[in-house]
Image (cartoon, rainbow, N blue to C red):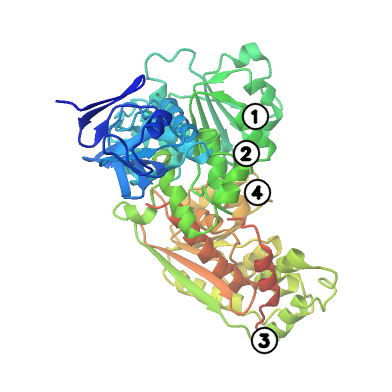
Amino acid sequence: MNDVWEVQDFQVVRVDKNTFSLISKEVFWENRKSETESNIGLQIMGFPHPELILTLIDETPKIIIQFHTEIGIKKIFEMNSLAIDHIVIDNNWFPLHEVQMNEINENLRKVDLKVGSSVGFPEYIKILRLINQGIQEVHLDLDPSIFAQKSLDERISSRIIGKPFDYQVTGINWLTTLFRQKTGCILADEMGLGKTFQLIGLIANTTEIEKIENLKILVIVPSSLKLNWKREFINFAPSIIPYIHAGADRVTDLTKFSEFQIVLTTYDILRRDTYIFKKFSWSLIVCDEAHTVKNRNSKVRIAVMELESDFKVLCTGTPIENSLTDLWSLIDIVKPGLMGDFNRFNRLIDNNPSDAEWIGKAVSPLILRRKVKDLENQLPPLIEIEQPLEVNQEFALAYESVRKGLISATSQMVGIARVAKLRQFCCYPPIVDREFNTSNNPKLERLIEILDEIYSMKSDQVIIFTSYKDSINVLLHEIKGRYGDVFVEPIDGRSNSDKRDQIVQEFQNLNRFGVLVINPQAGGQGLNIPAANHVIHYNLEWNPAKEQQATARAWRTGQKKTVFVHRMFYLGTVEEVIYDRLKLKSDIAQSALKPSEIEKEDKDVNRALAISPIF
């Protein structure tokens, strides 16, 4: 029989040895037998600290509550509602802070959960928002990747031409599933895995999903990729003809604009014509090369945030370029508020691999990230070759003059400006020091040695990346002079879209040795050049993502040969500092995204100005 203890208008009913019904804390204290014992034999303890935990119970994610008490940690696995003033555990009575317990109950109601409830993907997103907005502390005692979609919306539209790889089918299905759930996401596959194709697959699927009234799709891309996207639609989904909203003759009449179901525009035009795009509710918004909108204060990002849409998907192979705040900025576009306020995030999160791993795990259900090396069975091998170069005495002395500002070109420069001059000097010294002996250039000599070996293979082709117009001109002159009538062309700011596409097509059709010399800003993204199987980074970029993008021009779907990547850098110079920094930033990005232009911090600038090939 149940034991009953009457206390004024309340009663404690013993349900079992560990559980009692509710009773007012004040009444309980008034009727205690002593300072430490109640009239019904319960031991009176101090206030415990409650903590919500998201954990696996029988392989099912559930939310539980645990109390840190004087007798140890006690977990409660099921409870319809939490008493706001006390809890009884193991014949011990613990008072609770009412304000604290009221907050816990209220926050559980916000996510439609009770202690012991099963947690699915939608509930997890709500819980993550509570955590990152500082509303409630919830300990994640599980790997959030468990919330990745297990039951995918398996469909590939009949409008898609060609046979996709298995991983691309998975990507299209994943995107389509989240689209139906209106969740928003980031497609973060590494360069070369066909993200554009997967997004076109999503668009094709959405045109066939039932019950979507007034379907309107907006695709936003960098200006340089506008024609590439048009070509990809023709190649993979010729029945889908998007309206390209660009140029002086673009449609500005709202009535006519409303007739377009699928609109393709650029970030620049979006910023100019925001007033048009804001007039519509978009079923789907695709942002390609979404690192373009990572700057939270930029006008183009603000324009994207202002667009009304049920589903925004960001596409970028480099979601983290400078720091973890890049990832915050992108997640905040697809799920505003999910990662909390920026200032709070920036205050609590350090830019290190440990915090990066935590953040990466927390948002992993919203990110699909596949790496080329994990799909080697579908791509040929990639062989990376470091080319550290020692400088000779003449080069070292001239470099010192630039570093110390002893020549007129750098005498008035400080900090980052002089670092830029040092980088130019390492590409081709006469760019900075006109009196330098042009016949004495260790890097150019090593480049020619590499090209000689490739030339002897007859049919191999090369892409050389370098950052400066002057160094591009020098390389074009040297290569043409050495190899005579071979295909050697530049892709840089001098090449408009049509000319660039013509050069790439001609290069692709070669069956012999040929060279493209490319500025990574102009041709480091959006180009498919699998004809090349040698990539040479003549100078390193501060941004590891930019280098990866450039390499992926060759190592991508369609490549049949082993790809060789050479990284050239001088020891004891600014290039060694960049090389070391690239390694660190790559480690941080890998920690946050398991399966940039780097902002040059003061310490890196200082080291770049301090390192010397002489000392």
Q: What residue type is labelled 1?
A: Ala
Instruction: Quote the CA–CA distance across marks 3 and 4.
Output: 40 Å
**Which circle marks residue 495 in the picture?**
4
The residue furthest bottom is 393
The single residue placed furthest to the left in the displayed view is: 1
Residue 504 to residue 25: above or below: below
Quadrant placement of the C terminus: bottom right
In terms of image quadrants, where is residue 218?
Answer: top right
Q: Nearer the viewer, residue 576 or 348?
A: 348
Label located before the other in sequence (4 or 1):
1
Residue 149 visible? The answer is yes
Sequence-earlier tag: 1 or 3: 1
Q: What residue type is labelled 2?
A: Ser
SS at mark 4?
loop
The residue mark sitting in front, 4 or 1, is 1
User: In this image, 519 relative to 152: left or right?
Assistant: right
> Label 2 vs label 1: CA separation?
9 Å
Separation of disc 2 and disc 3 at Cα?
Answer: 45 Å
Residue at point 60%, 31% (across, down):
305
Q: Compared with residue 419, is residue 119 higher up or lower down, i.e. above or below?
A: above
Q: What residue type is labelled 3?
A: Ile
Question: Crowding near pointer 1: few (<14 within 10 Å), some, many (20+)?
Answer: some
Residue bearing the label numbered 3: 614
Q: Name the residue under label 2.
A: 223
Q: Mark 3 vs mark 4: which is more N-terminal?
A: 4
Is 471 located above or below residue 44 in the figure?
A: below
Label 4 close to label 1 by CB (< 8 Å): no
Dot 2 or dot 4: first in sequence order is 2
| Residues at marks 2 and 1 touching, judged by CB atoms closer than 8 Å | yes
